[in-house]
Amino acid sequence: MKKITILLFLVYTTVSLMAQNKKTKNADKLFEQYEYVHAVKEYLALVENGNTDNYVYKQLGTCNFNMGNSAEAEKWYAKSITVKQNADVYYNYAQVLKSNSKYGDADLQMTQFAIIQPNDQRSIDFITNKDYLSKLLKKEKLFVLNKLEVNSDKSDFGAVMYDNTLYFSSGRNVGGKTYGVNDEPFLDIYQSTYSADGSYSDPISVTELNTRFHEGPVSLSKDGNTIYFSSESFNDDLFQKDKVNKLKISQVNLYKAIKKNGKWTAITPLPFNSKSYSTSNPSIDKDGKTLYFSSNMPGSIGGIDIWKVEVNEDGGFGTPKNLGNKINSPGDESFPFVTDDNMLYFSSKGLIGFGGYDVFSVDLNSGSVPNNIGQPINSEKDDFAFTLNKDKNIGFLSSNRSGVDNIYSASPICKSQIVSVVENTKTANFLSNARVTLLDKSNIVLDKLLTNDKGEVVFNVDCNKDYFLEIYKDGFISQRSAAVKTVSGTSKVTIFLVPMEEVVVTENEIILNPIYFENSRSDITTQAVKVLDKLVYIMTQNRDLSIFVKSHTDIRGKDDYNMDLSERRAKSTVDYLVSKGVNAEKIAGKGFGESELKVECNKCSEEDHAANRRSEFIIVK
């Protein structure tokens, strides 16, 4: 499990010496040695023998809390709080209840925690955000998750992709010594090759980095030639001795290696490692100048904090700096990952979330406050080690939501907007209250909106699709946009509406310009659209109006050909009007060939021929 990566500084309730007795001595020793699996067996044996001590219940709750067994932790914490406990027990119990989706009960325990520790930032955040759950549930979903095929039945986590290689930590190396915290094998670093079809090769061990202790997760420089990774300080004979329990206590430390001839060499510990505190979970920025990591070193605000250190040009390091209380809380913050655009993702148990570790983001450029990125990335369980590869537009998440730490791909949900601005083509003024209709490529109406005072409407749409806009406003010729191809982000479209010229309506006719056609063609031209849209507007405002379309040709061509051509022109004119919403029963048309010339001529000019190729409109009713 990922708790292993922070190893021997797990948050647990300190064993009270007054609560210990001869009966709990063996169990307490195992507890202090972080052998939680065996400690649980000892404490359970005491319970089975009739021991109903609340101290034992509390110890069982804490063991299971540190092992990630939320159901068992809830059971024993519930028994322990029948007598007053210290603040950490109530806080841990609240987190366990949240992990079991019992948010109401968790709030009761957080209230008790806040009474005992009113000045703790976690208490303040809880009291001022009682509706936190509803706010989190309303957050927009940003990713789609899928469990990766590289997972095993052991802990797999901390995935990060460089080029086409996926690196991660795994406890699949069975057959050797197991870790007492969770009875799983020690962690090793593995790699898998990513293919263009989205598949992954069988993982292989990165043997030159792995030892008999824990390794991982990792972070690579932009050129892929430098790797930073977590391992144990035992590798450098760096440890503390616990003479009472006859223990050698190591820490998680950070190491660096250089790639040479395809292998990792020159493994060196970082200079700020210590036998007294941990340094782990590295993330190097794109320039290779700043290394982010997690640590409980002196100066930490909570149990584990996010830190950064400058990497000098000569390969040396500056002095680590805590990222401060905007990011770090009195709880644990870990698993930092910094993107190329300086967005920091990290996991927190101290900031408000669904339960366990939640993933947060913060823009380091603006100094904004951390943002819980919501579901489905976050759940009531532990969600951590979130990374992004923007070149391949894919992220990775580690989570124990299925009962064991697994790696999930996190594909960004592509969100797009179409911002349409409608203007008067003659005055360039914005047109408010214009009706803008959004259609898909099958001409299915998806939405209708009215423009605001700035002539704007905004449509939320899918990425990489074609959409069309139709714009209507009284007194203007209707307009249809060309296809709008959406991308991630915003597509802005400006539509210019032509004002409707004044139309003279008499008792017998509508005086409207005729529409003209290309030679030997029946297609509706751009000039014809402007005239016909005026007629559409007039007819939609006068529902009883009926129109007869007379279509004509010039004198070129044979009579029967011209008659057929004029019939096609009449039909295309009528079809256009009907397509725009004119009642088909109110419009009819007929072709007249060259029988009714507008310009009588023997040697006709091109202008004369063009004037004769037309459709005219007669009021029938």
Image (cartoon, grey):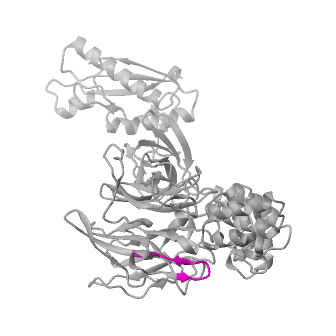
Q: Quadrant of residue 52?
A: bottom right
Is 199 displayed left or right of 400 in the figure?
Answer: left
Q: Tell me residue 240's x, y (percent).
A: 51, 82
Question: As rendered, which of 543 and 267 lies closer to the eye?
Answer: 267
Q: Quadrant of residue 261?
A: bottom left
Magenta stretch encompasses residue 121: no
Visible in this render: residue 425?
yes
Is 584 displayed left or right of 608 in the figure?
Answer: right
Quadrant for the C terminus in the image:
top right
Question: As rendered, which of 527 and 253 lies closer to the eye?
Answer: 253
Residue at 36% across / 24% down in the picture?
572
Question: As rendered, which of 518 and 550 lies closer to the eye?
Answer: 518
State whether residue 603 is above or below residue 427.
above
Q: Residue furthest right?
A: 82
Residue at 56% across / 83% down in the picture?
300
Q: Residue furthest left?
A: 603
- Region rendered in magenta: 241-254
Is 414 displayed left or right of 115 in the figure?
Answer: left
Question: As rendered, which of 542 and 30 lies closer to the eye?
Answer: 30
Q: Tell me residue 310's x, y (percent).
A: 37, 83
